[in-house]
Amino acid sequence: WDGVRMDLFSATFGLILYHYLIFPITIFALSKCGRRTSGTASSFPKVTLIVAAYNEAKVIEAKVANSFQLDYPDLEVMVVADGSTDATAQLAQAADPRVVVLHEAARRGKSAALNRAVDRATGDIVVFSDANTYLQPNALQKLVRHFGDPQTGGVSGRKQIANSEGRESTRGDSAFWNVESRLKAAQSELGSISVADGELFAMRRSLFRPIASDIINDDAEMTLSLVRSGFRVLYEPEAVTSEEASLK
């Protein structure tokens, strides 16, 4: 029994060591030989910004306002509030008459909501964003410029934690996402990141595949779907979003 416990300890310690030390160091070292160039685009295709908003009445008006303040020439903004029991759908529609609001009473999960939204989207590029996440004005342009390369299937943006007084987790969350940003940038230099961030993720609508209802991490599923199809998923640190820390 002592031997079994020692084996379990060694295996667990080894996994932790690999995840938090060996893997990042390896990626950072290999990225020094990376050859990815900055994205360029001669034109900006139509974008549909999709916001999955379940009971987000507290933030949805600000999110809609932020979306229509973005510096992008051809933008469709869509809020899918399926299953919401508060005033999310009504507030989103009242915030700006240009917004496309999808709402049905049945709650079938985020994956089903995203599938329905993409099916209704008219943009060549679909961009997914959370209701409590606010984009800098040039964020969409920074993302979309990479689609000038036909091998680019998706592009993930950078999440920053807003400075919020009274939220003790701000410093910890900020430190975590700073490290995550550097790791994703290094992976991108090598060709593709492993998982995109749902706070801001763009992909070609033609490459979207419906997400199964039992999938919990839709961000990872969409990323892996693109990579399995032979496309790259890049990280763009200049496409910045901001949101408050997760805990007070």
Image (cartoon, helix red, strand yellow):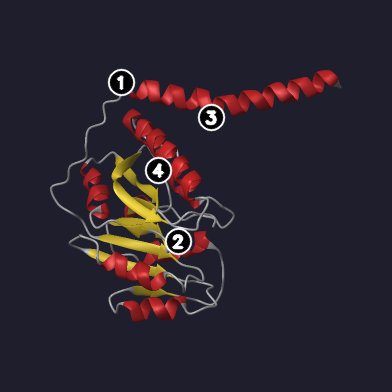
Q: Mark 4 vs mark 2: which is more N-terminal?
A: 2
Give the CA distance from mark 4 to mark 2.
16 Å
Q: Mark 1 vs mark 3: which is more N-terminal?
A: 3
Q: Mark 3 vs mark 4: which is more N-terminal?
A: 3
Which quadrant does the C terminus fall into? bottom right
Helix, strand or loop at label 1? It is loop
Residues under numbered marks 4 and 1 in contact, where contact means CB atoms less than 8 Å apart: no
In this rendering, does residue 56 appear at all? yes
Give the CA distance from mark 3 to mark 2.
34 Å
Q: Nearer the viewer, mark 2 or mark 1?
A: 1
- Name the residue type under label 3: Tyr
Give the CA distance from mark 1 to mark 3.
22 Å
Helix, strand or loop at label 2? It is helix
- Name the residue type under label 4: Leu
State how many labels appear.
4
The residue carrying mark 3 is: 20
The residue carrying mark 2 is: 115
Q: Residue furthest right?
A: 1
Q: Position of residue 65 (x, y in %)?
A: 31, 70
In this rendering, does residue 203 appear at all? no
Q: Nearer the viewer, mark 1 or mark 3?
A: 3
The answer to whether 123 is drawn above or below residue 221 in the figure is: below
Front residue of this view, candidates 142 and 59: 59
Give the CA distance from mark 3 to mark 4.
26 Å
How many C-alpha atoms fall within 10 Å of the one at disc 1: few (<14), some, or many (≥20)? few
Q: Position of residue 152 (x, y in %)?
A: 29, 41
- Name the residue type under label 2: Asn
The residue carrying mark 1 is: 33
Q: Position of residue 234 (x, y in %)?
A: 33, 40
Q: Mark 3 vs mark 2: which is more N-terminal?
A: 3
Helix, strand or loop at label 3? It is helix
Front residue of this view, candidates 121 and 220: 220
